[in-house]
Image (tube, rainbow, N blue to C red):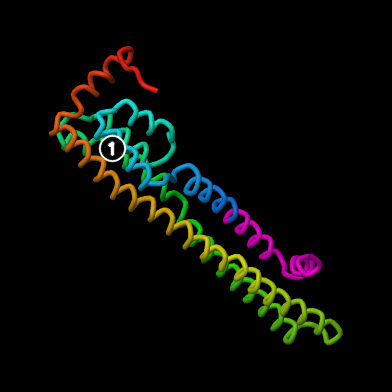
Amino acid sequence: MELLYTAFRDGGPVMYVIALVSGIAIAILIERVYQLYFRFSINASEFTAQLSRLIRGGQLKKAISLCDAAPNAALARVAKAALLKAGQDERTIQSAVDEVALEVLPKIQKRIDHLQVIANIATLLGLLGTIIGIIIAFKAVAEVEPAMKQQVLTRGIAIALYTTAFGLTVAIPSLFAHAVVKAKATKLVDELDEHSVKIINLLNEARDRGLLAAAQAQTANPGDYKGS
């Protein structure tokens, strides 16, 4: 803590700007981790397997209820859109899936690249602090009285070193965080693409085999449905 206090005391105003940037990075990281790992995420393979059993069993209403159990999960939202068009032609189902996907995908990818931008800004701010420190140091050599020269020179070197170190301290974790959340977002998008195709194929197969006729009637008349 004493080192941190000394760094902010001697590092100049650029240190506070870098600290502000780091606070923004932390806020974005916390929000993205929560959204990607807890809200939008679901065990895609297990979810699709359960959905497959229900669709092949003609239990359309239970399949929709399974989607409703995870209302924020990206795959569940897309699956529900497909299920609500069950029994219709493939183009209609695909259109419903695409519509929801276009709504969900930007939410998955939102603000992720901000972390990379923040890493670059932190590095540049550190460089700016270095330049300011060097300017102060050269000014000490050229203009300052001999009695004050060492003090001003030390201050310039401190600004250069502290801001560079702090800028890199913010930039490196920000780049790492960007890589982690970017990988998670890519995984969610890939799962969405893969399993939405599987669900559409399941619905087409069930429609062709006549498994959805009774299920659609059941959905249209919820009072007639008796299930656990």
Span of residues in magenta: 1-25
Image quadrant of residue 196? top left
User: As rendered, which of 61 and 162 lies closer to the eye?
Assistant: 61
State whether the magenta stretch is mostly helix, strand or loop. helix
Q: Residue at x 47, y 51 (%)?
A: 111
Q: Is residue 112 left or right of residue 29?
A: left
Q: How many marks?
A: 1
Residue at the farthest left position: 208
What residue sits right under mark 1 in the picture? 99
Q: Is residue 7 magenta?
A: yes
Image quadrant of residue 100? top left
The quadrant of the picture occupied by the N terminus is bottom right
The local crowd at label 1, few if under 14, some if 14 to 19, many if 20 or more residues have their Cα within 10 Å, is few
User: As rendered, which of 83 and 6 lies closer to the eye?
Assistant: 83
Q: Is residue 29 left or right of residue 183?
A: right
Image quadrant of residue 62? top left
User: As rendered, which of 173 and 70 lies closer to the eye?
Assistant: 70
Residue 140's place in the image compared with 120, above or below, is below
Q: Is residue 11 magenta?
A: yes
Q: Is residue 72 left or right of residue 205?
A: right
Q: Amino acid at mark 1?
A: Glu
The quadrant of the picture occupied by the C terminus is top left
Residue 8 lies, in percent from the top left, at: 74, 65
Q: Residue at x 61, y 68 (%)?
A: 167
Residue 88 lies, in percent from the top left, at: 17, 30
